[in-house]
Image: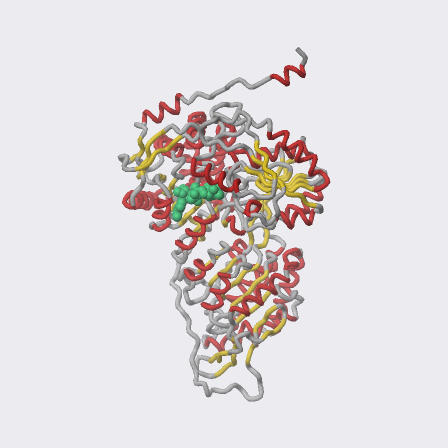
């Protein structure tokens, strides 16, 4: 027999992993589970079956939590939270470390149970999911240890409700639980209804680790239980799952003051340039779309290949597909396992059946006749606007198209409502580092894909959600600044007699400031502004929807601002400060005339300081290079959020506006500022300062009018990336509900006052930026 014949005829023998220990554990638990509340399992109640998707066999019976169960879990978490936070970081680190050790000790049991419950190949649960889980707990034991020193100005949020999906059941649990606990929070977690078993095994581990009762609570059930958690007395919701549910949660938590992070869907591009190492790019693609049967939020599900190598690449791809082995997920030789449930299988089947005017390739090597198996699929020839090119399929289905030039690749890659991840392959470092910043995505992998680590922030932009998991950014999402809160006092404009007159001969009707020009309000209406004694100070335009739209357009046209250097932005901010300082007396007098409080001079002085602070930070608020366990680096690059709408504080008409504006533009964003509703004239006086400070047109736009109307339009505008409200009228709920459309980032005051005399620049810088993690492997 020749070597060629041996290779041609060789086949894999079955190499199944034993499931005996996992079944023994299930039997030990009575194969029926209650919830894990306050350190103990409750008596199992009415519920549902958890099945092995590869065989359809019932693995266990799970309980559907009632409102009483959820309330009990939240109560236990609430009682436990104070002592858990007060224990200090090093105390909590001991427990997290103990959990990590125990998970390592039982790693095979976890891996097998995960594969039984979810259908993913054992190779993946054993070599990827479970090691990453352990790494997450070890890494966050370290963060707990360092918290008192490194996060001294921050504290735990309190009780966190955490709702996770079924694609990486234990890994998603680790991503949620480890940072929450490290920072002193307690949790109520709901695993997905298809895959709750490893979460329940984790509960057992918490018991073994001696974790104080109530720190971790786990309730099982479907979306209705998720809703109960969202509406319960919790301080934060952390959710991973579909964009539709994410949007519902955004609406449900609006205005409640609950912190929220959403990690949602994606349709991530996988870009292959003509100079890429094509064979490596093919192997990468296998990991991008057939890893975990494509049920990966950041799956490289949209292939973009440079036209010159497209034919060769697709030929290689089709050949590689033929060697992918489907089958028993417990078999160590299997590449593609079962999808999670018949419901998901039916959905993937339905979506693929909609493919029209294209070519569908499927590879069914070894495909079992029964069970939830879906063959690796490649769809060629779709137009970029086809729903299959745009919608998340969440299965082993790859769609593909070609591009000619790098700029066309970027355009196609960004042509999506999502922005979770992107992969690019090229041997040219210049090209890679030119393209990575241009991709609208929270994570970019260069010459690799689906790399994750506890030290590297993960999360999306656009409709892929907001907030980061992993790294320091992940910790920020489980903490808040320490400090007392004070209720917001609504501030009404002073009233005056219509007959009151302004000093003769001066036109006192201020316009708005849009695209670097003074513009009349579209409504054609203006309103008088009176001083404390009812004296007329001037008029301001009543801004409306059209003015907001014009301002957003102007801001978009100024997108070049985001590409300027921090150094240049600093120069402009310093220049602004100089110009404001030259007119300090005038501004102070104006503020005093409006508010009657005599604090104008102090307010102008503090405003100058904010401009100086922002200028100082403009070239120093840097990202990080993360030490991830690969030969390479993960760069955490801070990027501007984009275009931000701000309802400025009423009580500090100049300082409130500048405190927001300065850091926002320092970080390369463009901004639409709605001036103090009660005292708008300091903002309108600022136009001349902006005009004489070399600020490009459209970077700062200022509107006047009712915060409620302007805020509502801003929050609904699909081309705004964030809306913040510091208005003295509490518009938090209105803004957060309206922002759910494109899942824009919000920062609202939730009825709490801000002490503007304090410098909050760091918080503004953080809110004005989003971290993009760029993975760059190097070396041999
Ligand atoms: P889903 O978003 O409904 O489920 C995720 C989690 O949210 C589960 O624990 C579920 O019980 C819970 N949930 C459902 N409705 C809820 C509600 N109204 N309030 C609170 N929690 C709720 O996802 P599903 O239906 O399992 O999958 C549907 C599609 O979602 C998939 O085909 C895929 O496109 C996407 N998906 C995305 C994931 C990601 O990692 N980004 C993970 C899972 C699904």
Quadrant in the picture for residue 335: top right
Q: Is residue 147 visible?
A: no
Quadrant in the picture for residue 449: top right
Residue in front for this viewpoint, 613 or 463: 463
Q: Position of residue 69 (x, y in %)?
A: 29, 42
The quadrant of the picture occupied by the C terminus is: top right
Q: Position of residue 465 (x, y in %)?
A: 50, 49
Q: Is residue 263 visible?
A: yes
Q: Residue at x 55, y 59 (%)?
A: 719
Please count the marks in the image: 0
Q: Position of residue 23 (x, y in %)?
A: 37, 24
The quadrant of the picture occupied by the N terminus is: top right
Q: Quadrant of ligand 1?
A: top left
Q: Is residue 123 above or below residue 158?
A: above
- The outermost residue toward the front is 357
Q: Is residue 93 above or below residue 741?
A: above
């Amino acid at each position: 027999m020749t070597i060629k014949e041996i290779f041609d005829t060789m086949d894999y023998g079955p190499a199944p992993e034993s499931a005996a220990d996992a079944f023994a554990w299930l039997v030990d638990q009575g194969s029926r589970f209650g919830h894990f509340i306050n350190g103990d399992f409750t008596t199992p109640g009415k519920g549902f079956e958890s099945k092995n998707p590869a065989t359809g066999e019932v693995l266990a019976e799970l309980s559907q939590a009632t409102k009483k169960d959820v309330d009990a879990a939240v109560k236990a978490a609430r009682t436990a939270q104070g002592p858990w936070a007060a224990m200090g970081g090093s105390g909590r680190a001991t427990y997290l470390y103990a959990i990590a050790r125990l998970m390592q000790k039982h790693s095979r049991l976890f891996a097998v149970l995960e594969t039984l419950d979810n259908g993913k190949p054992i190779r993946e649960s054993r070599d990827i999911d479970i090691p990453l889980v352990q790494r997450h707990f070890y890494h966050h034991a370290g963060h707990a240890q360092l918290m008192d020193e490194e996060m001294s100005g921050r504290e735990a949020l309190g009780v966190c409700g955490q709702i996770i999906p079924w694609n990486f059941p234990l890994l998603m649990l680790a991503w949620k639980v480890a940072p929450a606990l490290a920072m002193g929070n307690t949790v109520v977690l709901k695993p997905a209804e298809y895959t709750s078993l490893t979460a329940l095994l984790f509960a057992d581990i918490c018991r073994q680790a001696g974790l104080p009762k109530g720190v971790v609570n786990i309730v099982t059930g479907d979306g209705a239980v998720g809703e109960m958690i969202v509406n319960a007395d919790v301080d934060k919701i952390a959710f991973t799952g579909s964009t539709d549910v994410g949007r519902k949660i955004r609406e449900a938590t609006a205005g409640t003051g609950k912190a929220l992070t959403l990690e949602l869907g994606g349709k991530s591009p996988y870009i292959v340039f003509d100079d890429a190492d094509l064979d490596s790019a093919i192997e990468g693609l296998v990991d991008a779309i057939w890893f975990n049967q494509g049920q990966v939020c950041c799956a490289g599900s949209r292939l973009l290949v440079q036209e010159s190598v497209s034919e060769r690449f697709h030929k290689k791809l089709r050949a590689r597909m033929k060697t992918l082995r489907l089958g028993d997920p417990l078999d160590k030789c299997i590449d593609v396992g079962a999808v999670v449930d018949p419901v998901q299988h039916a959905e993937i089947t339905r979506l693929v059946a909609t493919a029209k005017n294209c070519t569908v390739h499927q590879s069914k090597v070894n495909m079992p006749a029964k069970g939830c198996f879906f063959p690796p699929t490649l769809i060629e020839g779709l137009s970029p606007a086809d729903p299959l090119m745009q919608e998340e399929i969440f299965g082993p289905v790859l769609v593909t198209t070609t591009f000619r030039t790098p700029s066309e690749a970027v355009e196609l890659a960004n042509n999506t409502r999502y922005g979770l991840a992107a992969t690019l392959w090229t041997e040219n470092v210049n090209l890679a580092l030119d393209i990575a910043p241009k991709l609208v995505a929270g994570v970019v992998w260069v010459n690799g894909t689906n790399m994750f680590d506890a030290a590297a922030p993960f999360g999306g932009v656009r409709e892929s959600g907001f907030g980061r998991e992993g790294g320091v950014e992940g910790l920020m999402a489980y903490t808040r600044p320490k400090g007392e809160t004070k209720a917001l006092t609504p501030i009404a404009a002073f009233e005056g007699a219509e007959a009151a007159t302004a000093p003769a001969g001066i036109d006192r009707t201020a316009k708005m400031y849009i695209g670097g020009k003074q513009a009349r309000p579209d409504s054609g209406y203006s309103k008088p502004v009176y001083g404390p004694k009812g004296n007329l100070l001037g008029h301001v335009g009543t801004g409306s929807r059209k003015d907001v739209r014009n301002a957003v357009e102007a801001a978009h046209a100024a997108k070049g601002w985001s590409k300027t250097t921090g150094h240049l932005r600093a120069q402009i901010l310093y220049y602004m400060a100089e110009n404001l300082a030259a007119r300090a007396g005038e501004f102070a007098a104006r503020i005093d005339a409006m508010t009657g409080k005599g604090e104008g001079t102090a307010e102008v002085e503090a405003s100058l300081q904010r401009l100086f602070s922002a200028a100082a930070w403009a070239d120093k608020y840097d990202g990080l290079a993360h030490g991830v366990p690969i030969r390479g680096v993960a760069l955490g690059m801070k990027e501007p959020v984009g275009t931000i709408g701000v309802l400025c504080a009423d009580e500090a008409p100049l300082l409130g506006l500048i405190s927001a504006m300065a850091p926002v533009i320092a970080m390369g964003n463009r901004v639409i500022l709605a001036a103090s509703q009660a005292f708008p004239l300091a903002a309108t006086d600022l136009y001349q300062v902006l005009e004489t400070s070399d600020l490009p047109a459209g970077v700062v736009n200022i509107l006047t009018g009712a915060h409620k109307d302007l805020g509502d339009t801003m929050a609904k505008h699909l081309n705004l990336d964030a809306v913040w409200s510091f208005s003295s009228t509490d518009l938090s709920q209105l803004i957060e509900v309206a922002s759910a459309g494109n899942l824009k980032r919000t920062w609202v005051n939730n009825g709490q006052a801000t002490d503007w005399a304090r410098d909050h620049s760091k918080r503004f810088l953080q809110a004005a930026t989003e971290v993009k993690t760029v993975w760059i492997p190097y070396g041999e």
